[in-house]
């Protein structure tokens, strides 16, 4: 059994070969060890810039898109749309693994070494806070890609992902449980909270974590864990300082734009151009909208022959990690689960008033007011489907909600993901398993 895992070795190599940085963990001639806040800010910026683009890939597994058999990159992505995670064709794109641990290496360097070498200052605290927050976000993303959906009854035995907190090439990486990964996420979030200085980040710098982004992250984590009181608590805290909603009746920019008043943090490229170019909006997604009264429809989609192309993203302007509409949705779902149906409806309707034409909103409002708890829960999920289309949310909503049956037709053949299919949990990539026998 190899003790030096390929994953961490590759991460170290990646760190050593940063094109825009001058830093090594060893000091050869002409290089320097990062020591100052300025040095470590550059290392942290590299960590942000190299964060994996994976949420477009999971969209191919959902009922959001249909893959185009004639697209140039079809062969690279078809197996993802077929839910084939094992015995991959060599031409198939894998879900990221080494790139996550490469970013993790940067963050461990900042946390373990930067805490010792940077002089005490508010900037040092901010850098460390962001490093802890980004590490928490990284493991949250990984456990929701490669671990089972959080279940309080089984999380302590469900397999999660390996946790690496040290700069140690000799460490043996073995998977931690889903519960252990979530525990680490919360540990890092608490450290980030204690150190964070910035309440909000300026537009253009909002790929970075802030106090408000931390709260938004904590609300989302609580939602995934089914901790409704915490989800409500954190969502309320976010909305107290950042409750802006864009009225699509008067604004022509989609709410997921990085400069939108709704933007809280804009790190993730959730609809990569390469995926955008080889897919169409799935008929199920298109049919979920009222094309006359829902203002999102014309902003998100464009007719292309008999199909629709997604125009919502595909450029770096539409990076999005957290935005205020999501906090209203989290709050509404938490209130519903806490048996506060009337308050839950009032919360969600605040968003929908800004999404539908006046006549459309009146119709939606009347329909919502007549719903019981079960119908309203289904309506929340349907509205999440519409609101957050191609923002990297759908796969995870399906995992935590109903794990519905999905059918994809590819090259004339039907492929089916059955309800509660084990493939709702993505396998570790083949390359990762080959390189590390402990996986």
Image (spheres, rainbow, N blue to C red):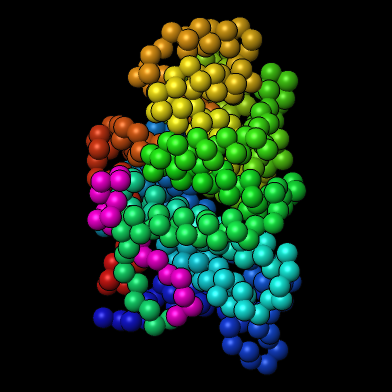
Identity of the residue drawn at 50% across and 67% down: 104
**Magenta segment:** 151-168
Q: Could you tell me residue 366's position as x and y percent?
A: 51, 7
Looking at the image, is 198 positioned above or below residue 358? Answer: below
Q: Report whether 361 appears left or right of 82.
A: right
Camera-side residue: 166 or 301? 166
Identity of the residue drawn at 44% across and 19% down: 341
Q: Could you tell me residue 217's position as x and y percent?
A: 53, 46
Res 258 → quadrant: top right
Looking at the image, is 362 positioned above or below residue 77? Answer: above
**Residue 161, visible in the rendered structure:** yes
Q: Could you tell me residue 325's position as x and y percent?
A: 58, 31
Q: Is residue 163 magenta?
A: yes
Quarter of the image for the N terminus: give it: bottom left
Quarter of the image for the C terminus: give it: bottom left
**Residue 134, visible in the rendered structure:** no
Q: Report whether 82 appears left or right of 323.
A: left
Q: Could you tell me residue 114's position as x and y percent?
A: 62, 75
Identity of the residue drawn at 30% across and 81% down: 2
């Amino acid at each position: 059994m190899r003790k030096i895992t390929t994953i961490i070795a590759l991460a170290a190599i990646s760190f050593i070969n940063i094109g825009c940085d001058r830093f090594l963990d060893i000091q050869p001639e002409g290089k320097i060890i990062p020591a100052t806040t300025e040095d470590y800010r550059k290392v942290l910026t590299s960590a942000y810039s190299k964060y994996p683009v994976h949420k477009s890939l999971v969209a191919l597994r959902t009922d959001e898109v249909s893959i185009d058999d004639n697209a140039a990159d079809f062969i690279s992505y078809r197996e993802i749309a077929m839910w084939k995670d094992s015995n991959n064709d060599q031409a198939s794109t894998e879900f990221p693994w080494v790139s996550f641990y490469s970013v993790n290496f940067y963050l461990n360097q900042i946390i373990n070494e930067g805490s010792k070498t940077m002089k005490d200052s508010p900037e040092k605290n901010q850098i460390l806070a962001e490093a802890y927050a980004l590490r928490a976000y990284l493991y949250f993303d990984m456990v929701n890609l490669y671990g089972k959906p959080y279940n309080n009854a089984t999380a302590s035995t469900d397999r999660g992902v390996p946790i690496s907190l040290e700069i140690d090439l000799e460490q043996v990486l073995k998977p931690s449980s889903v519960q252990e990964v979530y525990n680490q996420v919360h540990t890092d979030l608490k450290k980030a909270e204690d150190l964070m200085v910035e309440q909000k980040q300026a537009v253009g710098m909002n790929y970075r974590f802030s106090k408000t982004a931390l709260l938004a992250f904590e609300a989302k984590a609580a939602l995934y864990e089914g901790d409704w009181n915490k989800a409500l608590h954190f969502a309320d805290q976010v909305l107290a300082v950042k409750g802006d909603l864009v009225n699509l009746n008067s604004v022509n920019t989609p709410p997921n734009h990085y400069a939108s008043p709704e933007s809280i943090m804009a790190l993730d490229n959730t609809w990569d151009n390469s995926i955008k170019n080889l897919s169409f909006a799935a008929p199920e997604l298109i049919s979920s909208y009222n094309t006359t009264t829902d203002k999102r429809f014309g902003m998100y989609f464009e007719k292309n022959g008999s199909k629709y192309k997604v125009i919502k993203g595909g450029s770096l302007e539409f990076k999005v990690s957290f935005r205020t509409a999501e906090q209203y949705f989290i709050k509404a779902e938490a209130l519903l689960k806490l048996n506060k149906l009337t308050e839950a409806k009032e919360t969600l309707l605040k968003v929908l008033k800004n999404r539908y034409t006046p006549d459309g909103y009146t119709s939606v409002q009347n329909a919502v007011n007549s719903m019981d708890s079960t119908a309203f829960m289904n309506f929340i999920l349907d509205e999440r489907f519409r609101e957050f289309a191609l923002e990297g949310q759908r796969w995870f909503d399906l995992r935590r909600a109903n794990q519905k049956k999905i059918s994809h037709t590819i090259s004339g053949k039907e492929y089916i993901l059955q309800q509660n299919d084990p493939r709702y949990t993505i396998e570790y990539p083949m390359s990762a398993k080959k390189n590390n026998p402990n996986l």
